[in-house]
Amino acid sequence: MQPLYVLGIIAPIVAYASIGASIYLSPWFNWFNNALSDLGNTANNGRVAWIYDGGLIAAGVSAAVLFAQISVLKPSWEHLAWSIPGVISSADLALIGIFNETYGRIHGIVSTVFFLLITVTLLIFSYTSFPMGVPRLGALSLALGIASGLVWLVRWPWRGVAIQETIASLMLTVLLISVSLKRI
């Protein structure tokens, strides 16, 4: 595997490891009542917040570099159509860590944009998958894109959004790892 594509494996490992460590170190966290971003609130979660925020920043930068390099190395319309939203969504993930929950409204904006761009990136990838020669991955991406949008439209019986955030981010993770393993 080329070093460039290793970033697509490293980014989710870093993100989920930092989230997992933050949950472990935050016994107050409840999947049904909290958002994942509550873990990155430096005012309420002290030093543990830096683990969460730092992991998101590192993962976001890693994934953004991967998507940016794909844009540069494969400047076809098919690659640019999904890699550019991929760069923006990944940079936005880093911004969630930079402008953590203590920043209030700006955090809400970057979080909303991130989850919206997950859906957009997955749907655009599905559209361009046939010309790129990966129709099966495109079909999977279409299903994941629709599901990642629907996860926010369903009225769930719990108050928090940590479960929805995890589901949506796992859907982008599938694309990120698939792109890396197939070197698309």
Image: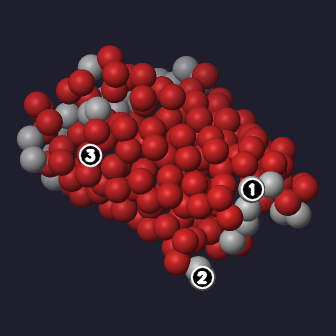
Q: Secondary structure at mark 1?
A: loop
**Above or below, 148 relative to 72:** above
Q: Amino acid at mark 3?
A: Asp
Q: Name the residue tied to disc 2.
A: 1
Q: Amino acid at mark 2?
A: Met
> Which mark, residue 63?
none
**Above or below, 3 relative to 110:** below
Q: Is residue 121 visible?
A: yes
In the picture, measured across the screen, residue 148 lies left or right of residue 115, that is right
On the image, which quarter does residue 130 sit in? bottom right
Report the residue at 11% width, 31% height from top.
43
Report how far apart the C-alphas of labels 1 and 3 lie in the structure.
32 Å
Q: Name the residue tied to disc 1.
A: 75
Q: Name the residue tied to disc 3.
A: 53
On the image, which quarter does residue 79 sit in? bottom right
In the picture, measured across the screen, residue 179 lies left or right of residue 113, that is right
The x, y position of residue 56, in whole percent, is 35, 49
The x, y position of residue 109, in whole percent, is 42, 22
**Above or below, 172 relative to 106:** below
Callout 1 crowding tier (Cα within 10 Å): few <14, some 14–19, many ≥20: few
Report how far apart the C-alphas of labels 3 and 2 lie in the structure.
29 Å
